[in-house]
């Protein structure tokens, strides 16, 4: 199975070197995937004994938060210098990279922060484009040249970064996106089945694909409902309001399935969202993108042990190859409807998918992922090389080596 490699070479009990980690990222209460990722990684690092100090990329409105020692204000040279100084007070600086969060064309101001650092740095590349513009290629390529290591979260991201951006493979480390691993008994799924899509809402989510498939599922013994959970993305909301959500509500009405499609715009914390995921019969990821090499939603679904039906974006193709879900072509609505029907009506198939997801789940816990980051940082501080060369696949690792204390 082709899946992200996990590079935990020592148990968390043996790692003692990295004392403090500076993280540059958006951060809660900012509503975005990078902010959620940064907070979860920070908790995981802290659980393993590292001191975590966050420099938040400011959105101009968020109140102070625990652990935040400063803010990077885009467009402010003084702020760039201050951010570099704060991060350099730690043993290692970890910078999350997404073109849209930093100032300047394609977020090029991140280069100024990297240049200001006096400690080793690790950059986490959340987006690795298949067809970047010349300037996008230049920005990420320069980031990779300046930093000591670049972390990606899938094999497809690693291959694309090295080939398209001409990055030295020895600098690239593959560590999976982390997830909260739920505990306790599984909820009763014997009632009306729920199909679930969640995340910040906006064009590109592909919700319309599932709504179009709903009428073909009306003849099932138990009529499924489709829950779309999540608030509208703040940038979408600022530009277009709730136009996308309202268009999908109107689409459901036209298709005669309004009573079976639920839009849940309530903000959910980790515990509430995890409970919602575990209560569904199938997670549906009908994204428009054919380019996406990292999906935290996909990882959360697998960590919760739920079957997945997804369009063929690269991370889904990679993660679901071992049987945890079904991948369908983007432009094949019949295949999407058929896949949903199969999961909802074939208990043996659904149970097999859930079991395959559950086998992967322990390797995706934030405790394991944070230990991998700390191991990487320890090696940087010790001056050791070879991190891009030898990567042990998750599936090749004995079960007792795939776990550590997850927070």
Image (cartoon, rainbow, N blue to C red):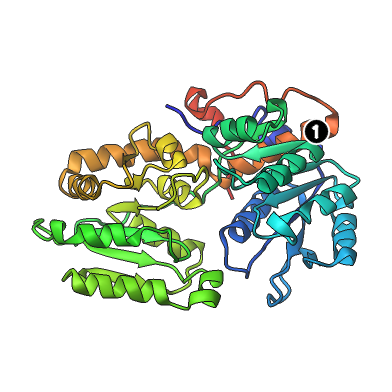
Q: Quadrant of the N terminus?
A: top left
Q: Which residue is mark 1?
A: 380
Residue 297 can be seen, yes or no: yes
Residue drawn where x is 70% and y is 48% of the image? 135
Image coordinates of residue 75 in percent, x first then y, are: 80, 66
Residue 123 can be seen, yes or no: no
Residue drawn where x is 44% and y is 74% of the image? 266
Q: Nearer the viewer, residue 77 or 390?
A: 77
Image coordinates of residue 348 in percent, x first then y, are: 19, 38
Q: Would you identify the image quadrant in which residue 30 lies?
A: bottom right
Residue drawn where x is 66% and y is 63% of the image? 27
Q: Would you identify the image quadrant in which residue 70 lies?
A: bottom right
Image coordinates of residue 180 in percent, x first then y, are: 51, 51
| Disc 1 secondary structure class | helix
Q: Is residue 144 left or right of residue 405?
A: right
Residue drawn where x is 74% and y is 39% of the image? 144
Image coordinates of residue 120 in percent, x first then y, are: 84, 40
Q: Is residue 83 left or right of residue 152?
A: right
In the displayed structure, would residue 338 be above or below residue 372?
A: below
Count up the numbered dots: 1
Q: Is residue 152 left or right of residue 324?
A: right
In the displayed structure, would residue 286 be above or below residue 170?
A: below
Crowding around mark 1 (Cα neighbors within 10 Å: few <14, some 14 to 19, many 20+) is: some
Name the residue at the front extreme: 134
Q: Nearer the viewer, residue 219 or 20?
A: 219
């Amino acid at each position: 199975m082709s899946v992200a490699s996990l590079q935990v070479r020592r148990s968390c009990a043996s790692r003692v070197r990295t004392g403090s980690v500076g993280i540059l990222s958006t951060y809660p209460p900012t509503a975005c995937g990078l902010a959620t990722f940064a907070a979860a990684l920070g908790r995981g690092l802290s659980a393993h004994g590292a001191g975590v100090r966050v420099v938040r990329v400011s959105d101009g409105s968020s109140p102070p938060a625990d652990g935040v020692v400063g803010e990077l204000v885009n467009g402010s040279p003084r702020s760039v210098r201050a951010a570099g100084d704060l991060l350099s007070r730690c043993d290692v600086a970890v910078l999350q990279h997404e073109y849209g969060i930093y100032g300047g064309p394609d977020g090029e101001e991140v280069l100024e922060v990297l240049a200001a650092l006096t400690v080793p740095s690790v950059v986490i590349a959340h987006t690795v484009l298949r067809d970047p513009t010349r300037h996008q290629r230049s920005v990420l390529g320069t980031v990779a040249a300046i930093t000591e290591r670049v972390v990606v979260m899938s094999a497809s991201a690693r291959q694309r970064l090295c080939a398209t951006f001409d990055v030295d493979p020895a600098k690239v480390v593959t560590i999976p996106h982390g997830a909260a691993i739920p505990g306790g008994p599984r909820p009763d799924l014997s009632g009306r089945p729920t199909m679930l899509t969640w995340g910040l809402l906006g064009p590109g989510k592909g919700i319309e694909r599932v709504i179009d498939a709903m009428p073909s599922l009306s003849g099932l013994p138990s009529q499924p409902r489709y829950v779309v959970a999540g608030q509208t993305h703040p940038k979408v909301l600022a530009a277009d309001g709730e136009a996308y959500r309202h268009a999908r509500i109107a689409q459901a009405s036209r298709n005669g399935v309004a009573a079976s499609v639920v839009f849940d715009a309530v903000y959910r914390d980790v515990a509430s969202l995890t409970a919602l995921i575990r209560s569904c019969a199938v997670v549906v990821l009908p994204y428009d993108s054919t380019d996406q090499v990292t999906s935290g939603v996909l990882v959360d679904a697998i960590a919760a042990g739920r079957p997945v039906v997804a369009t063929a974006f690269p991370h889904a193709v990679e993660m679901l190859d071992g049987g945890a879900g079904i991948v369908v072509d983007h432009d094949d609505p019949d295949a999407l409807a058929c896949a949903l029907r199969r999961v909802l009506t074939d208990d043996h198939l659904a149970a097999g998918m859930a079991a395959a997801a559950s086998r992967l789940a322990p390797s995706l816990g934030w405790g394991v992922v944070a230990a991998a980051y700390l191991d990487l940082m320890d090696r940087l501080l010790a001056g050791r090389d070879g991190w891009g060369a030898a990567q042990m696949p998750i599936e090749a690792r004995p079960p007792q080596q795939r776990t550590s204390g997850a927070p």
